[in-house]
Amino acid sequence: FELGINFIIDNSKMAEILTGGGVSSLLKETSEAIQLQVLELTSNETGTKRYRCKLWDGELQQDALFSPDFTREVDEAGLQNLGVVSVQEFNLVKLQDKTSVNVLKGSVVEAAMETKILSVSSPATQEKVQKRMSYPSPPSEAKPSSMRTSANTRRIQPIGALNPYAPNWTIKARVTNKGDVRSFSGRDGTSGKVSSVDLMDEDGSEIRATMWHDLVDKYMDVFQVGKMYYISKGRLKVANKQYSAGDYDMTISEQTEVEQVGDDEMAASPMKLSYNFVPFDALAANIGSKSPFDVIGVVQQTGDVATVKRKADGTDLYRREITLIDSTSKSVRLTVWNQLAQEVLKDLPEQVARGTVVLAIKGVKASDYDGVSLSTMGRSMVCLDPVNEPAADRLRQWYDCEGGKAAPSVSAGAGLASERSPGGQGGSGQVTSLKDMQPAELAPASAPAEFFSARATVTRFSNKGSMWYPGCPEVGCQKKVVQEGGGWYCEAHQQAFPNCNYRYIAQAQMMDSTGSAWVALFNEGMETIMGGKTADEMVALREEDEAKFNRVLKQATFQPFCLRLKSKTDEYGGETRRRLTASTVQPMNWSSESKRLLKAIESMS
């Protein structure tokens, strides 16, 4: 009986948060604010981000869609599934026999709750009360827990065990990277700033913690790379794998508690990095992947630190080029940026001169430049000569004692069409005809993409849609921007820029001796086809002189190119089709091409 009464008291306290009969009030289009719990919270995968959910008043639920502005607001507040929102402005959208609530304005009352709230009078609540009053409680049993107890009796939760539905946690983690402070302007003219830190615990599990507005000033000097902290009462949400290594991201709020770990305790808590190394002969499969990965290799060559200008604001970026080799006898070029290039690896040339250096990098991305190349990211971590890492020991043994140092190495990008040779010619691997790329029997959509080298000529461009889109001017960002209030707003940066960078995105019909195919072309490839003219130049030309614009387009046709094409089966609208995309486009080098053809003729005889 006591358990049943306690359940009623606890649930009635939670139910007081919700507006009784709130769903019915929504459908009556009331003008008063209504507090409802959020269930089944999801977001769209393409276009402007918007949340869909079911709004719950303790007894009834209603389908709802958040406006883009309200979506951004609840993201900043760290809203999670089972959280509570106050709906202040909305309208009803009726589609056939269904009604949906379009939430225009509101606020977050509770970012997360531990459970679905039930009205005390609801049948489900009454059933639970009856069960608790009718049956005795089972004896408590000790359950295994993932919690740890620290030296000062805190109960520590591993980062890998965090989830949004258990908010009472404390983690003990080291700051591995601290991002720059970024300022932005909202659509409504308000300004703000944001920054983040990457955290790792003793098990090697990671999470990114983001700070907004005044909390940036409060915590940016508190968090120091290499120091360790106790952190609790942060808000968790599912991570974007493109930018985060863990399963969840953390938002630091006014309620978040941060305390630095003492030096003695920190020294007794070594950080263990967890790697997932990709061998160099398998790097091509990771080209263009949004998920970072890890590599390890022996340093063959290292260059000096150089600078490049950031296109958006003219600031200097620092980089260092390093050549690595692994036990597959494949070599690859790695570009390390900024702090890693200037400070962490500042003594690398002297170390390489003294002997064998093994370099492990956690969190890199691959591009198709020079066939395949690697680059560090903002959260990348490097480790010279890792200790207690079996992969490093095996690699050093191979290089020093098993002939690896003397073994001939081949570039990991050898044979790929984007590999550059003195004449600018693509790699001379097997050339495939357009006909052979389009078999009568299509592979299933789940099959991996295939890559081919081709020689083909552009015959015409598609007139469906635009050949370009307005892109973010920030270096490394290719997101589309929208024009607002005399500027260009980027959703990814949550910032308005005075101008945009137009980027090509076009469809061209290409032809070789066996047939033709439509090929998707992106910015770098189209610039090559257009003779170096950028999308910005073509936009301006079209506005100034339409006839001259058409002549430039015509001049770009019936010119042969060397291409690296990606072939993938897609399903769209219930229809299966083969899609060809140009990953690289190079001008024809007639000398190299003649040699390739002569070699092919000789092989026939």
Image (cartoon, grey):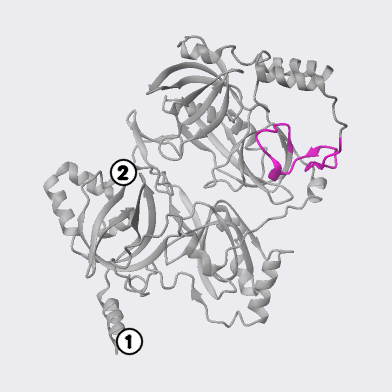
**Visible residue check, residue 191:** yes
Q: What residue sits 28% from the left and 56% below the top?
A: 526
- Res 408 label: none
Q: Residues within 10 Å of mark 2 (few under 14, many from 20)?
A: many
Name the residue furthest right.
Answer: 139
Secondary structure beneath dot 2 equals strand
Q: For this view, does 399 lie left or right of residue 51?
A: right
Q: Amino acid at mark 2?
A: Tyr
Which numbered mark, 2 or 1, is in the foreground of this view? 1
Number of residues whose C-alpha sits closer than 10 Å to that of mark 1, classed few (under 14), some (14–19) or many (20 or more): few
Q: Is residue 75 above or below residue 542?
A: above
Please, what secondary structure does the residue beneath circle 1 have? helix
Please tell me which residue is depicted at 55% across the width and 76% down the height of the picture.
329
Q: Is residue 103 magenta?
A: no
- Earlier residue among tags 2 and 1: 2
List x then y, in percent, for residue 233.
Answer: 69, 31
Q: Is residue 498 left or right of residue 361?
A: left
Examine the rendering and report whether any part of residue 213 can be seen. no
Magenta span: helix, strand or loop, mainly? loop
Q: Which residue is mark 2?
A: 469
Quadrant that contains the N terminus: top right
- Residue 468 lies, with reference to residue 285, above or below; the image says above
Q: CA distance from mark 2 to mark 1?
A: 46 Å
- In the image, residue 370 lies at what x, y percent? 42, 67
Q: Which residue is mark 1?
A: 603
Q: Amino acid at mark 1?
A: Ser
Task: Measuring from the top left, give residue 462's x and y in whole percent.
Answer: 22, 50
**Who is closer to the viewer here, 136 or 541?**
136
The magenta-colored residue range is: 141-170
